[in-house]
Amino acid sequence: MRFLKKKGTTIPTKKSKQKLHYIWILLPLFVAGAIYTLSYIAFHNVPEIVIHNLGSNSEKFVGRYARENLKNLSSLGPRLVGSEANEIRTIKFLTNAVEEIKSNALSKYKIEYQVQTASGSYIIEDMVDIYQDIKNFVVRFSSPCCNSSSALLLNSHFDTVPESSGAGDDGTMVVVMLEVLRVLSNTTRSLKHPIIFLFNGAEENSLQGSHAFITQHEWAKDVKAFINLDVAGLGGREMLFQSGPGHPWLMKYYHKSAIHPYASSIAEEIFQNKLIPSDTDFRIFRDYGKIPGLDMAHSYNGYVYHTKYDRISTISNYGFIQNAGDNVLPLVRSIASSEELENPDEHSEGHTVFFDFLGLFLIFYTEHIGIAINISIAVISITAMTISIWAMSKTMDESILFILKNFGIILSIEIATLILAAAIPIVLALIIDATYSPLFWFSQPWLIFGIYFCPFCFIMAMIPAIYLKRSSKTFPLRFGIQLFLHAYCVILIILVIVMTGLSIRSTFAVTINIAFYTLSVIVNWAVGLQSRPFIWVIPVLVSQIIPVAFYSYLSQIIFTTFIPITGRSGCTSLSDLMIAAFTVIVAVLTTGFLTPLFSILRRPKIVISGFMVVFVIFAITMATPVGLPFTAYTAAERHWVFHTKRAFHEIHAGNDTSGLDPTIRTELKNDSGYILLPLDRYSTISIEEILSRSKYSRTSGDCKEMLVCGVPVYSPEFKPMSNYSYWVPAEPPIIPEDYNAAIELESRVALNERTTRFTFVISGPAHMQVFFNPLNQCQLVNWSLHEEFPKKDYFKESTYFIHYRHGLSSNSFEFYLDFEAPAGYEGPIFDIALIAHHNNYPIEHTAEFDEFLSIFPEWAVLTPIVSSYESYRIY
C-alpha cells in the first residue's frame, strides 16, 4: 500500500493497480509494426499492367503498348541535344508512332504534328541560357466539332543526360503521352477543348525545349493550362507535387479523375524552396507562359536518376507505367472537357493544400480554408484540454490552480525534453559527419531507425518517466501522463499557430495530429474514462492509428525521395544533418503522444532503455562493412570524370586602332588530365582512396587564377563543386579536329574613352559554357547575349555564366560584351573561358583514360566525358 495526500487526508492506492505489466508493450509494438507494414504496402502498390484493349478496355490505357514503345525508345541509347540520336532518330520514332496513331484514329478527330526548330535565350538563376536550332516534336489533337481555341498542354521530354538511355527520365512519360494520345484518338467521347502534346527535346539543358515552345510556337498562344510529366528515378508511383499557382480547380479535377491519387503540398513547398537540386518545365510554363498547371513525377529509386542505370534492364515491374496512365488519361479527359479551361483566370482563388491518404483518396482545400481549419482545431483542442483539466480537479478535489501549476511544470519539462530529444540526433549527425562516416544509411536506410530515431524516443520517454516517478506521491499517475500528453498538444498548437502565420501550407501535417488527439480527449471526458485506470489509454492509442499510418506513409515518401538526392547534392551539403532533421520531424509527429505512455508500465525505465540497446546494436552494425554507404548497381556512388585539355592565354590590344587587328595573343601554359567532382558528402574520402596511387591535387589552389577553378563544369549545379574537385595529370584526350572548340576575339572597338566593345565567336560541340569575370574595377555595361541587359546586382556572383547548347545545324555563336574601365586604366579588363564537352558524337577514349576508369570500385557509377577548357585574360 502507498498513500496519496489530499487536503489533509490520505487515500490508499494500490501500486499494482496504477501500472500495467511490461509485457503489454508487445501489443502496441505489434500494432505499430502492422501500421507501418500497411503504409509500406500502400506506398509501393502499383496496378498490374493491362495487356490488351478488348471489350470493356477499349478506352483504357494499355500499359503493354507503352512498355513496347519504351523499349524501342530506350534502344536509341543516350539522347543528348546535338546528337543524331536526339535530333534525328528520336524524331523519327515519334513521327512513326504518331503516324500509326493517326492511321487508326476515329475519323472525327484531327491529329496534326510539327517538328519545331528554335533558337532563343533567357536568364535563369545566375546564368544566361542560350540555345540554337534545338528540336521539339509537337502534336495537336482536336475534334472539328468543337470550336474552342483554349488548349490543354501535356508535356514531357525525350532528351537525356550523358550515359543514360532515359528509360525513366523521361522516356516513361513520353510513352505514357503516346498511349494517352492513342486512347483518346479511339474514344467515342468528344472533348470540349484541343490537347497539345509537347515532346520537348531539350529539357536537360536547363529547360530550353519548353522555353522554345511557350515563347515561340504558334500553338502556344492557345494553351490555357498544362500538365507536366517528369521522372527523377525509375518505378513507383508518380507524385503530383506542384499545382497552380493559384488555381484550385485543377486539384478538383485531379481529385475527380486520379484512380491512384498520390499528391502532397508538402512536396510542393519542399521543391519550391529549393531543397531538391532539380527543376522541371513547370517553372518555364508558369514564369514565361503565365499559365497554371500540374507537375507530376516519379521519384522512386532515385539512385539511378541521371546515371547509366536508368535503363530498361533496371525495371522489374512495369506496373508504374500503368499507374501513371490510369491517372493521366482520365485527368486529361477531365481538364480538356472542363468549363474552367475556357478562361482559367476567372477561377483563380489562391494556393491549395492537398494530400492523399495511403493512396486511397485525396483531400484538398484552399489555403484560406486551411487557415480556418488550423485555427478552429487549435481552439477546439484548447477548449477540450481545459475541460479535461477541470474534470481532473473535480476528481482529485483540488483547485484548478493546483492542476494548472502542475501542468505548467510539466509543460516546461516537455518543452525541454523535446528540445533535448531533437538535439541528440542532430548532434549525432554532426559527430558522424566530423568522424568521416557520413551517408552510412545511403544503401541501408533502415539504419536511420536505430541511429537517429531511437535516441529521440529514449529521451522523450525517459524524462517523463523520471518525473512521474518522483511526483507519484502528490499526483495520480494517470493524470500525470495525461498532462504530459496535453502539454505536447499545446506545443503542437503553438507550432501550428507559428506555421500558419508564416503561410506554410504544410501545417496540415501537424494539425492532423492535434485533431485526432483532441478527439481522444473529448471521448475520454464525455464517456467518463478519463479518471479510470488503464482504460483511458485505449481512446488515446486508437486515436493515433490514423495519424501514425499517415506519418509512416509520409516518412517513406520523404526518405525514398531524399536519400538518393544526397548522392548528388555536393560534398559541402551536410547530408547527415538533413536526414537527422527529417528523422526528428517524423519522430515528433509519430511518437509525441505515445512516449509518455511508457510510464504506465511496470519498470518503465528498463523498457525505455530498450531504445538505447537498439541504438548500440545499430551503432555497432554501422561500424561494420554494412555501414559502407554504397552498393554496386542499386545504390552506387556517382563520379563524373572529365578527361580535359586546358590552355591559358593573354590577349593584348594590337597597334591597329581600327579594331581590325585587335589582338596580340600569348599562350601562358597548357596541360591535360582528369578532373573529378565530389558529388556527395562521402566523395572526398572515396576519391582520395581511389586516387591513392595517382599523383593528384585539389583544384582549390587554382581558383584565384582560373575561372571556376579551371574545372570544366557541365551544368550550373556543378559550379559549387569546382572549388573541391581533384586534378590528375594525364596525356591529352582525343578530340577530332572538326569538333575542336574555340573562342575567337573577332574585334575590339572603343565606344568612348572608357568603354570598349569586345566581339567574340565561339564554335565547337553542342554542349558549351562561357564564363567571364570583370577584373579590378572594370564593369560590364552592356551585351548582346540576351534582348535585355540585367539590372545591376541581378546576378549574385561577379562571374557571369553563359549556358550554350545547339542542335546539329549550328556550331558557332557570336556575341559582344561592352566593358567600362576606370579612367587611365591599362591593366587586365576581364577573364573569359570557354568550356566544351564532347558527348554528342562518338568519341574514342585513350587507352590511359580507360585504364584510369578501371580503377574505380564496382560500387561506383561513372560518367566519363572528354572536355576542353580554354581561358583568356583580356587587356
Image: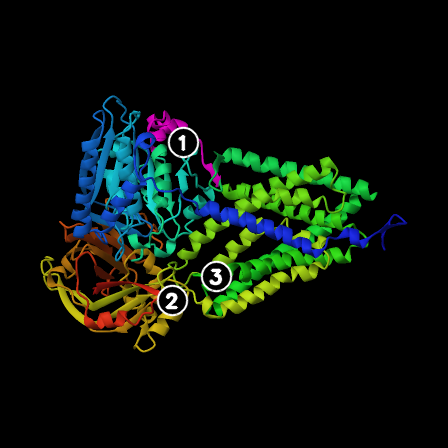
CA–CA distance in space, label 1 to label 2:
45 Å
Would you say residue 616 is visible in this rendering?
yes
- Residue 104: percent from left, percent from top: 20, 32
Q: Is residue 129 above or below residue 865?
A: above
Which quarter of the rendered picture does the C terminus lie within? bottom left
The question of residue 525 being in magenta is answered with no
Indicate left or right for 322 with 198 as reference: right
The crowding category of the residue bearing disc 1, from other C-alpha atoms within 10 Å (few below 14, some 14 to 19, many at least 20), is some
- Which one is earlier in the sequence, the residue at label 1 or at label 2? 1
Which comes sooner in the sequence, label 3 or label 2? 3
Say the numbered circle drawn on residue 683: 2
- The residue pinned by badge 1 equals 253
> Going by the image, does 775 lie left or right of 21?
left
In this rendering, the answer to whether 343 lies above or below 671 is: above
Amino acid type, callout 2: Ser
Choose top left, top right, bottom left or bottom right for residue 681: bottom left
Residue bearing the label numbered 3 = 576
Determine whether label 1 and label 3 are within 8 Å by CB.
no
Boundaries of the magenta span? 332-356
Side of 485 where 813 appears, left or right: left
